Image (spheres, rainbow, N blue to C red):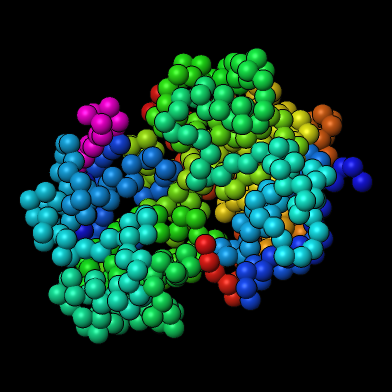
Amino acid sequence: MNDKVIVCEELTKQFGDFVAVNHISFDVRKGEIFGFLGANGAGKTTAMRILCGLSYPTSGKATVAGFDVYKQQESIKKNIGYMSQKFSLYENLTVVENIEFFGGVYGLSSAEIRRRSDRLVNKLGLAPEAKKLVGSLPLGWKQKLAFSVAIFHDPQIVFLDEPTGGVDPITRRQFWDMIYEAAAAGITVFVTTHYMDEAEYCNRITVMVDGKVEALDTPGNLKARFRAASMDEVFYQLARGAKRSAD
Amino acid sequence: MNAVVLDHITKTYEAGKVLAVDDVSLEVAAGELFGLIGPDGAGKTSIFRILTTLLLPDKGAASVNGRDCVKDYKAIRRSVGYMPGRFSLYQDLTVAENLHFFATLFGTTIEANYDLIRDIYEQIKPFSDRRAGKLSGGMKQKLALCCALVHKPEVLFLDEPTTGVDAVSRKEFWEMLRTLKQQGITIVVSTPYMDEAVLCERIALIQGGKIMSVDTPANVIATFPVKLYAVKAANIYRLLTSLREDTAIDSCYAFGEYVHVTFRDDAEPDLQQWQQKLTAQGHEQVEAKKISPSIEDSFIRLMNEKQNGQP
């Protein structure tokens, strides 16, 4: 099936005796907003690193954008975008320099970078700040710019690792508008968050507990199944029994 | 008596270029569980650092239990507990060594005030020989809280103790705070999570260095000035796009599975007609209802009013 952009089958990662990711299986469809939830230490980061081509699994199968996570890591990296709360942009480069840098890393031509860069800066309303250091921008702007840079090279999939942590409630919603827009344009969005109201914005959700996928469905179906009024309650019911806790 | 007083406090950085705290005044009563609610960059950490005497304000006065934050800094340091946002214990000391170190620093012993930390410390005691740097996030948080409490402080300052922590651990942490409050300790805690605001007795909503509101969570909600509606449909993004084009609507923003809506001139819509209209526009599974606002609704409204220059 061509519309599956991520396919995981029994994907497993062990560190010595510790099974960080334990036989997880799921598919993510093109243009889907896929929420990847779990308690601290559930194995989310480890699984995400494998899917981004940064770490090899111990066993199981997975393809991302049609490329194999064992053999085609470099092709995966070229076809995805990545953004995390912790690091995304160079604070001591300007807005435009950051765009040029990431465009260059992803192999876009100078002419193409310039064309897209102008368009992006105008779209974000950052024209007056284009020559300012990113470090001097408010957090909300940085996050919006970081997301735009992550999809600058038109990746098939963008991985967002807690993209809205600490951001004010208005900016958080503006950020989700950008996510919706990207998804509507066909970019698949794979996102982790600690805000349970954001879980409701996803088309489908997985909840990982102690290395396993404990639930995978639409927010509506999960709430019905757990007889819960909100995703917060669903998460609490699932993650309460977790034995592991780590960063 | 008030445990904490901020009187027109202003703090800038980089020679006045960055305004972090903008003329903030507030009071926290003794024994209160008080929350500073706001996003990153709101000024929460600067306020904590002024109150714990680690930073001098540019203007204004601050005191903790009647002691001035500038003149009486030594007395304040002895009598408060502070848990900074970033993990600040000694990573290469063990759990037990860290706790012993902080007890000694404050001229006391772990045993002297063990009652206060027992419930929290027992949870990490099985790992007492493990280096603090090797602990999980949740355990680090518990150890840091024990170290901030070991000298039985009068006032406890907790700067974003639950940031980056999952929803289950956050719930547990707030239960610990409630237990501590019952022992008479004044607690000032900050958080960017709006849903945690209702767990405080009183809250200050803070944004861009300015306090937007100080009240009980119930009063913040009760003073929401207009009627609020929630509407949902199968495709929430398409619904949001339609609602934005509706000139009768004053504000609309996604809120979990719903979109929250207020109408111009606080008009009261006929819910059935509204649902029919949306269905006619091609939306499926439309459901609309009147709701009571949450703290996050209030925060968004206050932020918008501030940006639009309204009172």
Residue A123 is left or right of residue B11, and the answer is right
Q: Which quadrant of the rendered structure holds the C terminus of chain B?
A: top left
Q: Is residue B18 magenta?
A: yes
Q: Quadrant of residue B186?
A: bottom left
Q: Is residue B36 above or below residue B240?
A: below
- The residue located at (87%, 42%) in the rendering is A3
Q: Is residue B162 above or below residue A3?
A: below
Decide which of B227, B232 is in the foreground and name it.
B232
Q: Which quadrant of the rendered structure holds the N terminus of chain B?
A: bottom left
Residue extending farthest left: B71
Judged by its main secondary structure, the magenta piece is strand
Residue extending farthest front: A71
- The residue located at (61%, 31%) in the rendering is A105
Decide which of A51, B202 is in the foreground and name it.
A51
The range drawn in magenta is B7-19
Q: Is residue B237 visible?
A: no
Q: Position of residue B128 (x, y in %)?
A: 38, 80
Decide which of A42, B185 is in the foreground and name it.
A42
Decide which of B47, A24 is in the foreground and name it.
A24
Q: Quadrant of residue A222?
A: bottom right
Residue extending farthest right: A1
Residue A118 is left or right of residue B17, and the answer is right
- The residue located at (44%, 83%) in the rendering is B126
Q: Position of residue B221 (x, y in %)?
A: 47, 47
Q: How many marks?
A: 0
Q: Position of residue A239 (x, y in %)?
A: 63, 68
Q: Is residue A76 visible?
A: yes
Q: Is residue A96 magenta?
A: no
Q: Position of residue A104 (x, y in %)?
A: 61, 27
- The residue located at (73%, 38%) in the rendering is A79
